[in-house]
Image (cartoon, grey):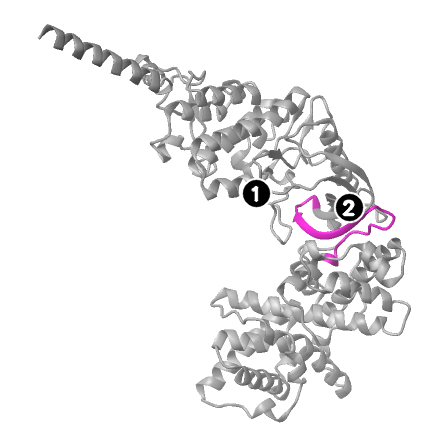
Amino acid sequence: MAFPETHRSVVLAVRSPDQQERARALEAVVAAYWRPVYRHVRARWRVPDEEAEDLAQGFFATALEKGWLARYEPARGRFRTYLLACLEAFVANQRRDGRRLKRGGGVTLVPLESQDADGETRELQLADGSDLEAEFQREWSRSLFALAVQALRQRCLGTSREVAFALFERYDLEDHDVSERPRYADLAAEFSLPVTQVTNHLHWARLELRRTVLEKLRGITASEREFRAEARALFGAEPS
Amino acid sequence: MKTPGDGALDRLRQVTQWPDLSGRRYELQSEVARGGMGVVYRARDRELERDVALKVIAVAAVDPDTAARLRREARILARLEHPGIVPVHDVGELPDGRVFYAMKLVSGKRLDELVREGLPLRERLRLLLRICEPVAFAHARGVIHRDLKPENVMVGPFGEVLVMDWGVAKHRGEPLVTGDAASPNAAGSAPHATAHGTVVGTPAYMAPEQARGDVERVDARADVYALGAILYFMLTGRAPGRLQASPDAPTRTWAGPRHASVAPGIAAPRELDQDLPRALEAICLKALAPEPEGRYAGAAELAADVGRFLEGERVSAYPEGLLGRARRVASRHRTPILVLLAYVVMRVVLLLVARV
């Protein structure tokens, strides 16, 4: 399967002269990175939830205000690495100055309550050193897949593909042990479909999810090289 | 927006790469292992209502050579009907052109994991005998495995042994396919590969002639070398050849039996564990001889010598002296000798008492 080629990079669009395009780009960057940033702050500086949320919000607000995102140069490395370096500097400054940002720095970027609906139920792993960067990458992957699943759901809603997403949700998204996972025959009975249709729908949904993940990835990377490197890291192998 | 947990994230990563099984009787359940050539899935066979393992060419490897290799692996496995070799049920092509084959789903532990958990020496040796059986069977049918290593041996819950991953196996007289130089990287179908699909070859288990790419000289004795390396691992807990000596270093003569030698960079097992019996070390080093001519002729001959060691008999690899032979005989017949000694001592005592 080929990579999607046409999706414009929001990482580059944050420096667009068009204010609306800039705002949309920033929103996309925040959607992909809010959670990794928040969890990194918690793990790296071992701060309580609320302070981590404040710092994450403050970081994006400051990045917007100071134009940090627009100053990113693709030739100097991955956007994710750049963003992490900015975050490190920002939080270090905040803590050194003993300042605690007013929640969100006056700007609400994402609805915090819904953002953490699932994450709060999981134990936060406090890691050190290089583990932190790996954890940041993992959280970033998690965000990317969550966004892609959300987009896939939206795309299927109200269309003939709704059943494909419902099957995908039951078979692939729900957390089952192998022994508890439903059989295709069970799903076929549940959805009143032939088994062959279950196979086809699941395959379509998986392919669509992959395409959507790659589309989102292309959006938040700045160059073809970065995109391919991130795709390799995400899927383990570069697709043909 | 709900974010996936760690398990769900890993599954999503996997399922987005799963092959299209439209029109097939299998339904994929989970990914079991990933290598350079293929991915192994746990799947449900709807027709026969049983779980199977499906080996499918990896997405990135859809090319005629890889497809040919996978088909060849399936054919080789189909020829080798033996309890120690995974049976193949089906082979075919998916709608996207990827070749697959279905085989028995194997449960159990890999040999390297099992050995690291700690097993008594005799149990380890009995396991080696069971590994030698399917390999000897394959040799008798002209098939050389060429990628034997602890990671490619599965031990089931009842001690049953299965030799896995025949992806680079070669049939006698068969022409080689592209990329079949038997180099470490050619061993691309190893199911123990990392989650990111990187396959690491294991030169430590590879016979020197195989590692050099001297294809003409690679025969059953290359597998004997690998079995010797597995024995070495079972005895010492590490693979041979980790000392990274220069390839130009001279072959070192071993201070054990005459005529034996050790390839550069390999420490004799007793250098690592002095409690190991000398005869067992001799068997191991004979299998690991740098030249094929110095090794056992096949897996059956190696197994026979290990069997003799287990029975307390003289092994062909170890020319023991009188004292060594006496020790071995004494050890083998400990109970009758002790009974005899006790009888003799009793008679002597009775004689002395009678004289007094």
Q: Is residue B113 above or below residue A29?
A: above
Q: Residue at x 71, y 71 (%)?
A: A146
Q: Which amino acid, mark 2?
A: Val
Quarter the N terminus of chain B occupies: bottom right
Query: Marks 2 and 1, how far apart in space?
Result: 30 Å
Residue B332, image x, y percentages: 38, 19
**Residue annotated with mark 2:** B62
Residue A130, image x, y percentages: 50, 65
In the image, which residues are magenta?
B15-39
Task: Determine crowd level at label 1: few under 14, some 14-19, many 20+ residues with C-alpha closer than 10 A.
Answer: some
**Residue annotated with mark 1:** B109
Position of residue B146 in the picture relative to residue B90 (left or right):
left
Which quadrant of the view contains residue B200? top right
Secondary structure of the residue carrying tag 2 is loop
Q: Which amino acid, mark 1?
A: Lys
Task: Determine crowd level at label 2: few under 14, some 14-19, many 20+ residues with C-alpha closer than 10 A.
Answer: some
* Whether residue B178 can be seen here: yes
